[in-house]
Amino acid sequence: MARPTIEDIARRVGVSKGAVSFALNGRPGVSEATRARILQVAEEMNWRPHTAARALGGARAGAVGLVIARPARTLGVEPFFAQLLSGLQAGLSAHSVALELLVVEDTTAEIEVYRRWASEHRVDGFIMVDLKVRDTRVDVVEGLGVPAVVLGGPGRHGSLSSVWADDREAMLSIVDYLAALGHRRIAHVAGLPAFQHTQRRMRALRDSARRHGLTDVSSLPTDFSDAEGAATTRMLLSRPGRPTAIVYDNDLMAVAGLGVAGEMGVAVPGDLSIVAFDDSVLTRIVHPALTALTRDTFALGTEVAETMLALIAEPGLRRDRRTPTPRLAVRESTAPPALAG
Amino acid sequence: MARPTIEDIARRVGVSKGAVSFALNGRPGVSEATRARILQVAEEMNWRPHTAARALGGARAGAVGLVIARPARTLGVEPFFAQLLSGLQAGLSAHSVALELLVVEDTTAEIEVYRRWASEHRVDGFIMVDLKVRDTRVDVVEGLGVPAVVLGGPGRHGSLSSVWADDREAMLSIVDYLAALGHRRIAHVAGLPAFQHTQRRMRALRDSARRHGLTDVSSLPTDFSDAEGAATTRMLLSRPGRPTAIVYDNDLMAVAGLGVAGEMGVAVPGDLSIVAFDDSVLTRIVHPALTALTRDTFALGTEVAETMLALIAEPGLRRDRRTPTPRLAVRESTAPPALAG
DNA sequence: GCCGACTACTAAACCGCTCTAGTGACTGGG
DNA sequence: CCCAGTCACTAGAGCGGTTTAGTAGTCGGC
C-alpha cells in the first residue's frame, strides 16, 4: 500500500478513525488492550502521520523558523552560526521538530518572511538573532502572536523570551586581564554598531577603560568580515602610537588580524597581543593560538532549542534563560607589552 | 481578521471557493474580469495560502530536504557546507521553497529521516551529499520515489540526478604543478576513505605520481577534522625523508597543517609547500596565504537548487549537471623545494 | 429555431487527521 | 429496580485548500 492512513488502521483493527487517533496520540478514550492492538497494527503497516493533515487542524506545524539577515555569502564563514545551528538541530531533532532556515539580505526581507511563515502556518515559533538597537522585528513578531526566542544579551526585546549571556561582564574580564598585563593602549575592532551586542561591548569597554584610567582606548566598527577586520588592523598598526593589544569582536576578524600582523612584521604576542571575543577551532589552528573568550556555542544552541520547545508547549509564559558568561581562554597570543612606550 | 481563507475572499467577491482557487492559481475557468477582482481582494485581505492545506490535497510540500550525516559538532567549522547552504538558500528561496535541514550522527539515522520525511510528505525532494563508496542511501531514496539530487563527482548514484565537478582533474592539476616546481616527495592528507570523492582523489594522486615517475607519494586518511589534520602533519614532518609538499583535502586541515609547520619551525613555503583542496576565506586570512583549489561553492549551491527545482517540476527526467573543474589559485604557500634532498 | 459546443461558474467531494458530541453498555448507589 | 455516572467507543464536522462533476447561459451554424 502506498501510504497507510489512520482509516486503514481503523479498518484493519475494526474500530473507528477516532479511536485510532486517540490511541496513537496517547489520549484517553480507548482501553489499554485496544490501544496496544492499534499501536501494533500501526507499526506493522509502517504508518507515519501526515504532517500537513495534522497542521491543518490547527495543530503544530512541527517546525521552528530561523531567519538570518546577513548577506548570504558572508554567513558561510561564521563558525559561530554553524556551531549554533548544530546545537539547535540537536535540541530540536530530539523532539522531531525541524528547523526551517532562511538567509535573507536585510531586515525588511526578514520581516516579510516572518509574516509569510506565520500566515502559512509553516512554523510553530521563531528564533531571532542579531537584535538591533531599536529593532522593528520585535514589534512585528509580537504582533504575529507566534512564540519567539531571542538570542542575545540582556537587551530590549519586549515580551519575547530570550536566551542570553552577559557579554558586558565578558568584555570587562578581557580588559581587566589586558590591563593587568600592563597594556595601556587597547583597540577594539567591533562589529556592526547597529547590533545591540556590539553596543553593549563598546559601552563595556569605555566603562572599563575609565575605571582603569586608560585614555588610549577606542572601538572601531566593522561589518564582522575578515576583509574589514584585516583593513582595520592594517590601519591600527600603521599609525603612530599603535595599540599594544587588540580585541576583535569575532574569531574570524581576529585571525585576519593575526595574518596582517604577520604580513607587517609585528610579532604576536611580543609587539601585539590579540584577543578574540568568540571562539572556535579557528583560534586554535593558527599559530600562535589565539587567546579567546570561549563558550559552548553548541550548548547555547541546544539551550535555545529547549527554550523554544518549552515555549511552544506552553505559550504566554515568558522565559529568560541566562547562560554562563564566556570565560577567557588564555593561549599564546597575549603577553605583557614590550617595554617601548 | 485572524487569517483570511479563500472562503472569506469568495464571500466578499460573491463567487464560489472554486472560482477563487482557479483565479489565485492562474488556472482557466474564470473570466479575466473576475480573476482581477479576486486577486485584488486577496491582496487587500492580505491572503496567504495555508501550506498545510495545500500539501494535504497531494500537492507540493514547498520544501526540500537536506540531511547531513556528520557529527554535529564538526559540521560547524566546515566553510564548504556553510557556503553551499547559502547558495542553496538563495536558489530555493527565489522560488519560495524552504530548505529543511537536519544534521544526524550517521547514515542509518539519515536513512530513517528520509523515510520519515517522505512518508510525512514534508518535502518534495532530497539533496544528498557525501556519497559513500557503496552507498545504501541511493537504493533507499530511489525506492522512496522522491526526487533527489546528488552532489558529488562522477560516481555511482543509480537513477538519481547529480551535480558534480571533476575532482580527478583537479587533483591532477595540483600534482602537475607541484611536480613542475620540482617536488618529488608529496603527501596527501586525505579525508574519510569511505567517501567516493576521497577515493577518487587518492586514485588520481596515485595515477599522477606514476605518470610523473614519483615514488615517494602517499595518501593518509583522516576524518576531515583540524585535529587529525594537525596530528597527521606532525607525524609527516617528524619522520625522516619528510615530504616537501603536502596536499590537504580541505582548507581547515590545511590551515591546521600550516599551524603545525609554524610550531615545528618548518618554513612555508621554504621548507614545505602547502596546497588546500578547498577554498574559503580561511586560506586567505592566514599568513602566508594558502595556495588552494578554488571554486564557487555558493554558485554550486544555487546550481543544485535549480536542478532540484527542475526535477520537482518534471520528475523522472534524470539530470546530470557538470560544474567547472576547480582551478588552482596560487598564493604564497607554494614554491620550489629547498635544495637539500 | 433548435442543437451542440463552449464559457464561466457552482456545489461538493476529497486529502488525513483531530476533536467534540453523542451512544450504548455497564456499574453502583439509593 | 431505576437513574446517574462512567467508560469505551463511534459518527461526523471541520481545518483550507484543490479538483471534478455538473449547470446555467451564450453563441454560432444550419
Image (cartoon, coloured by chain):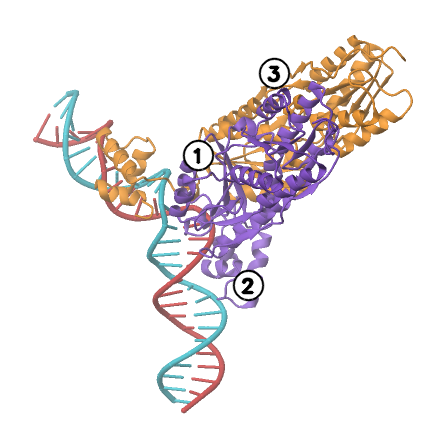
Chain colours: A purple, B orange, C red, D cyan
Do tags 1 and 3 sit on the same chain? no
Q: Amino acid at mark 1?
A: Thr
Query: Can residue B53 be seen?
Result: no
The chain carrying label 2 is A
Q: Secondary structure at mark 2?
A: helix
Q: Amino acid at mark 2?
A: Arg
Image coords of residue A165 (percent x, y)? 58, 46
Query: Can residue B32 be seen?
Result: yes
Q: Amino acid at mark 3?
A: Pro
Residue A107: give its label: 1
Image coords of residue A140 (percent x, y)? 39, 43
Residue at the image position 64 percent from the left and 22 percent from the top: A237
How many angstroms separate mark 1 from mark 3 (CA)?
Answer: 34 Å
Q: Nearer the viewer, residue B43 or D28?
A: B43
Residue A35: give its label: 2
Residue at the image position 75 percent from the left and 11 percent from the top: B177
The chain carrying label 3 is B
Q: Secondary structure at mark 1?
A: helix
Image coords of residue B124 (percent x, y)? 50, 36
Residue designated by label 3 = B324
Q: Nearer the viewer, mark 3 or mark 2?
A: 3
Q: Secondary structure at mark 3?
A: loop
How many angstroms separate mark 3 from mark 2 (CA)?
Answer: 57 Å
Q: Is residue B317 above or below residue B77?
A: above
Q: Are marks 3 and 2 in contact (CB under 8 Å)?
A: no
